[in-house]
Image (tube, helix red, strand yellow):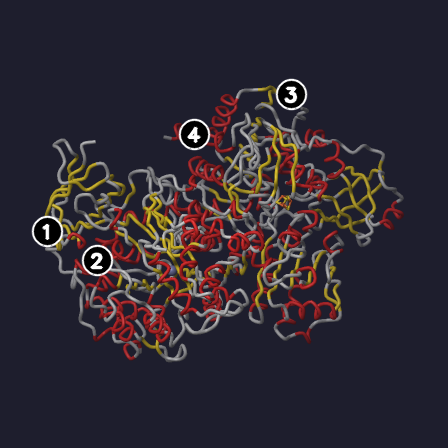
Amino acid sequence: MPGLLIKNAFVIDPLSGVKGEVMDIAIRDGKIVEDVPSGAEIIDVRGCLTLPGGIDSHSHVCGTKVNFGRYMSPEDMRAGRTARKGVMHVTSGYSVPTTFGNSYRYSTMGYTTILEGAMAPLEARHTHEEFTATPHQDMLANTLFDGNWSIMDAVREKDVKRAAAVVAWTLAAVKGFAIKLTNPGGTEAWGWGGDMSSVHDTVPNFDVSPAEIISTMIKANELLNLPHSVHLHCNNLGVPGNYRTTLNTIGLAPDLNKERQSLYLTHVQFHSYGGTTWRDICSKSEDITMAINSRPHVVMDMGQIMFGRTTTMTADGPMEFKLYKLHHNKWSNHDVELETGSGIIPVYYSRKSLVNCVMWAIGLELALLTKNPWQCLLSTDSPNGAPFVKYPEIIALLMSRKFRENERKMIDQRTEHFVPLFAIDRELDWYEIAVMTRAGQAKALGLTRIGKGYLSPGAEADVAIYPIKPGEIDPSVDYQQVVAGFSRTLHTIKRGRVVARDGEVVVEGANSTIWSRAHVPPEYDMGKDPEFIKKFEQYYTVRMNNYPVQDVYLPRGIRIETEASL
Amino acid sequence: MRFLLNTGRTIKQGSFVERKNNPSYQVAAATILMNPVDMLEIMVEEGNHVRVKSDTGEVVLQVSPDNGLTRGRVFVSLGPYANHIVSPETHGTGMPDFKVTPVSIEPTDDPVLTVSSLMERCGGLPYED
Amino acid sequence: MKIEDVVCSFCGCLCDDLVVEVDGTRVVSVENGCTLANEKFLGDHRLKTPIRRSGNSWTKISYEEAIAETAAILLDADRPLLYGWSGTFGEAQSIGVHLAEILGAVIDNTSTVCHGPSILAIQEVGHPGCTLGQVKNRADVVVYWGANPVDAHPRHMSRYTTYCDGFFRKDAFKERKVIVVDVRETESSNIADEFMKVNPGGDYAVLSALRAIVRGKGDIIPARVEGVSREQLFRVADICKSAKFGAFFFGVGLTMAPGKNKNIRNAIELTEELSRHTKFTISPMRGHWNVYGSNEVFTWISGYPYAVDFARGIAFYNPGETTSVDILKREECDACLVVASDPGAHFPKACAEHLARIPTIQIDPHVNVTTHLAHIQIPVAVAGIDAEGTAYRMDGVPIRTRKLFQGSYPDDLVVLEKLYAIVKEAKG
Ligand code: SF4
Ligand SMILES: [Zn+2]
């Protein structure tokens, strides 16, 4: 293969320090190279915006609860269906598309890597099966530890090293990527119908608090030298007044890592509410961003909501039940023994609902008030805030004050009394958007070590070329063009191959699954630990031998190896 | 006499699902359980044959007593015999009425058909290995 | 050779603690399994080669011939139906869905005649459930409604409920109350602490009565509801409300009875009502081994758990219309591929008659009732014995089965991939 040359690309590559230069990009054997021999295929993109492939650092696309979202929602499946065409399989679904639906839609938007936000270890095999059916993106799985009995036992014993050892064994067994804590302690309490209402509550029967779980896991994470930090969904999601819990949580984070943050907070919009009830709920984005701005070792993603229909799904079972009691639509719940929980309900975010308008504003404020774009990444916690196909609109809202003002006219007129949004002039630029949609994710997830998120030689050739000429349009005014441009690439290149062109997928994919393997000294091998083994013999309903995800489930697995400092 | 037919899984029927040409499968699937008083009423004894008729069809089964059944109700394990008398109507649900088929039952000297001859009557060709 | 932690491939319990001794290509003993598992592993009654019906006789044919002819039949059909799937593993089911997609066929699985109505109810009101280990470790109240686990899921009670000690239930048999609700006495009702005998077709009314009591509207309950006394209804409601963790399991006794999906909806809404007072979960007793896996696989590929019709190019779903019994009853399909199930035994006679009328091809290790109706049968390796792959337990936990020995039969995946390749080639 003589390679591929992308000519006249308007490149923004934040990790390589390229802030908008017209240049050529040479690709060979799936990598970015210095140059290619003559005879290489040439694509002249005539000054179009060229970015590293998009990376979603928090989305729900594969696994038990996602599939249950599809299973229980034929109305959503009907809302987005396409027929088999060329290499493309049939797709169904709007907010919870089928795996191929997710893969094609992400690919045509220029996304080449996705992190699944929540995988229960016991059900990991399911997530991996769906990963292989999401062929156009490299996939990673956040692995849930929020209600893990072995972890809570270690936390109670104040044994950080043991907690680290449990994480190392579990990630290796289930081929997980990072530590996810969803409402830590709350999912175990939900096993009895309870929940946690602050980081200092006590988890029934385990005698630990969310704060202790979080602090221990942050340290354990660094002992294992994992690529990503702890990925946290705070307690009290969606509760008026919850910003205090969030501030308390941020306060728990030490600065332990030079390369990246020590704590990643996900969908922070859902955790930035003031007020005491749904009647007086207001934005506390200023308090939250003030805390973030003063702590460079904390990174968050927005969790933006967008108006319209979607499906909420999270490991946070108790939260979904609370939400169900408000919405009265339909409710699914799925608790996972010794590990975690989950819940699903459909929702409709309405411009006529003051609460929803406040939520909408908060997400945008978080992005606009965070000074450093590397600390606030773009997300909707798809599909919780909105399906990911809404990202282009969010980008446009962040880039255009005018767009926001137009929206202001359409929403509940009382909104402005509860949020600071309309007093914010800031409009993000192309560079900041590039940070918030790929470079920031690569850095936060620790994926630069495997060549993701940048375009200099040696990097993986994952490239997104959008039909946008940055010099020729003013995003502040031409925001509709921004929406259209980010909705479908001219070319999406994955590992050196053009996989999508003008909104259509053109080849069959062959993705990889990226997982973490932390090597621990033999005395920390939980596979030989009698207490740990006992949990399988007595309390799990699956034998320890049948628990690990076999290699056949990762046909092109990429293992990130680390040496634990134990 | 009129009865209400119920069908369901039984461990015997389950045990033979992988050898349905076996006579034991036939015994498991072609047995109709009845309350003993009902058996007296229609004058049959354990092992006797009865003709069971519904609006959909009819089939010959052999009787076995079951004290747990309320009078007027009968039970056949799910399988090809029961399906000879269950209606294919699903009322728009995809699921036939497997649990409540009104039937009439009378004694008969006719034999209980083998599974393969039952299928032959449906247009199939018996395969004997 | 003794193999440990073997996964049983018979029922939806997917017990994964069997110890199986194998001698060459023969299973010689099974430990820990129930009667059904023993039959499954020790039974050796396979069809030896592919067979084809030619007029009034059966002939042996080669795999190549059988697969080629199957492909030709499916390609020639205007409205093929691909039915079954519960007895095979996910990887094969996945090829099945893609085959249906490319053929513009209807694909349906056995939930169509077991828990299809449960799926319809879940699509209306959702499903508050949990994994079986939650029940094992926590439940102090277990309800079986229209289910007879002793016969249909023989180890359900010993592995997950009644007899199974858990972390918070050190002496399960004493600490756990078992309520059985059924229209007849069964082995299961005999061991219940409380047996509620309901008139046939009366489940909906009894569920409604319980909901009313839990909601505090008990004064409207008459002296008897469908054969159940007011006293017993109040007693059962009280046991449920005062549970610390209640687990409700329901079987085909509820899905097949009059009311069908409405019964399940009522049961789910009762669970939701109870969740406002305490912790309560509900779970269907999925019967046929990997039937839940077929729902999962169909869903992530097509968006729908069963009864998926690709005739319009897109995936279309309308149970009652696109379900197998309805399609066969209307004599609508003109070819049928049956994989890993036995519609000849489990569908009403009118459906069997239509299967005999059209070319029906069966991919299955054993001679079953459908064999006598088929045009071609292709024997394959048995999932969980000489074929391995992914299966989903009734609670959604995915487990990989083991291959105990290398036999001489190809597995479902191999046969289906060959079939798919021919069809894909022909369709371009
Ligand atoms: S209960 Fe079911 S899965 Fe378990 S051994 Fe018996 S048949 Fe097999
Ligand atoms: Zn999330």
Residue type, mark 4 in image: Val
Q: State the residue position of label 3.
A: C56
Q: In this view, does A89 lie above or below B71?
A: above
Which of pointers 4 and 1 indicates the residue nearer the eye?
A: 1
- Closer to the N terminus: mark 4 or mark 3? 3
Q: State the residue position of label 2.
A: A435
> Numbered disc 3: what chain?
C
Q: Looking at the picture, do discs 3 and 1 lie on one chain?
A: no
Q: A48 and B89: which one is in front? A: A48
Structural distance between the alpha carbons of marks 4 and 1: 49 Å
Percent x, y for residue C48? 60, 24
Q: State the residue position of label 1.
A: A21
Structural distance between the alpha carbons of marks 2 and 1: 16 Å
Q: State the residue position of label 4.
A: C423
Q: A233 and B72: which one is in front? A: A233
Q: In this view, does B95 lie above or below A298?
A: above
Is the residue marked by circle 3 packed among few (<14), some (14-19), or many (20+) residues within 10 Å? few
Q: Which element carries disc 2, helix, strand or loop? A: helix
- Residue at point 43%, 30% (across, down): C423
Residue type, mark 1 in image: Glu
Residue type, mark 2 in image: Val
The residue at label 4 has a CB less than 8 Å from ligand 1: no
Q: A182 and C254: which one is in front? A: A182
Structural distance between the alpha carbons of marks 4 and 3: 29 Å
Question: Can you see residue A312?
Answer: yes
